[in-house]
Amino acid sequence: MSENELLEWVADKSIIVVEDESSSRMVLAGLLRSIGATKVRVATNGEDALRQIETKGVPDIIFCDWMMPEMDGLTLLSVVKPLHPGVRFVMVTSKKEPDDVRTAAALKVDGYVVKPYARATLMDSLARLRAKEA
């Protein structure tokens, strides 16, 4: 798939960035917008994301931090995936130990991005999500 095809695919997707740290949330949302995502919402934790899903609709993709107050990423994943199996869920975290990766995989995470991330990292993650749809 060409980069242009990926950018067109991303432009059509609704995305929620769930991150409790304001600077990380804005950086990730900004990176997604810089690669063509036009429907990007942000949430400060899992509870905020659930409220948005209930009021504004189910997104195509969720990029979610693992460790957050009130409701962490694993809890959000365990709630969202059974109710909305079509949502693509990407865990964004500094956790990279094999046990952590296995835990997320067992809950049906669709992607895993280790912080710090860059445009190329996000493009790779999005390309893998796109490939799963094909």
Image (cartoon, grey):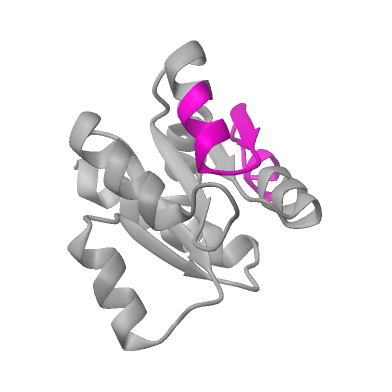
* Left or right placement of residue 107 versus residue 4 in this view: left
Estimate the x, y position of residue 16 in percent, counting from the top left: 54, 35
Q: Quadrant of residue 33?
A: top right
- Of the 4 image quadrants, the one containing the C terminus is top left
* Left or right placement of residue 29 versus residue 4 in this view: right
Regarding residue 18, the answer to whether it shows in the image is yes
Which residue sits at x=50%, y=51%? Answer: 64
Which residue sits at x=62%, y=44%? Answer: 32
Which residue sits at x=40%, y=65%? Answer: 112
As rendered, which of 132 and 5 lies closer to the eye? 132
Magenta stretch: residue 47 in it?
yes
Outermost residue on the right side: it is 23
Regarding residue 89, the answer to whether it shows in the image is no
As rendered, which of 86 and 8 lies closer to the eye? 86
Is 109 drawn above or below residue 7 in the view shown?
Answer: below
Outermost residue on the front side: it is 70
Task: Find the magenta span and give its range.
Answer: 31-51
Estimate the x, y position of residue 120 in percent, counting from the top left: 58, 65
Estimate the x, y position of residue 46 in percent, counting from the top left: 50, 42
Magenta stretch: residue 103 in it?
no
Estimate the x, y position of residue 8 in percent, counting from the top left: 48, 33
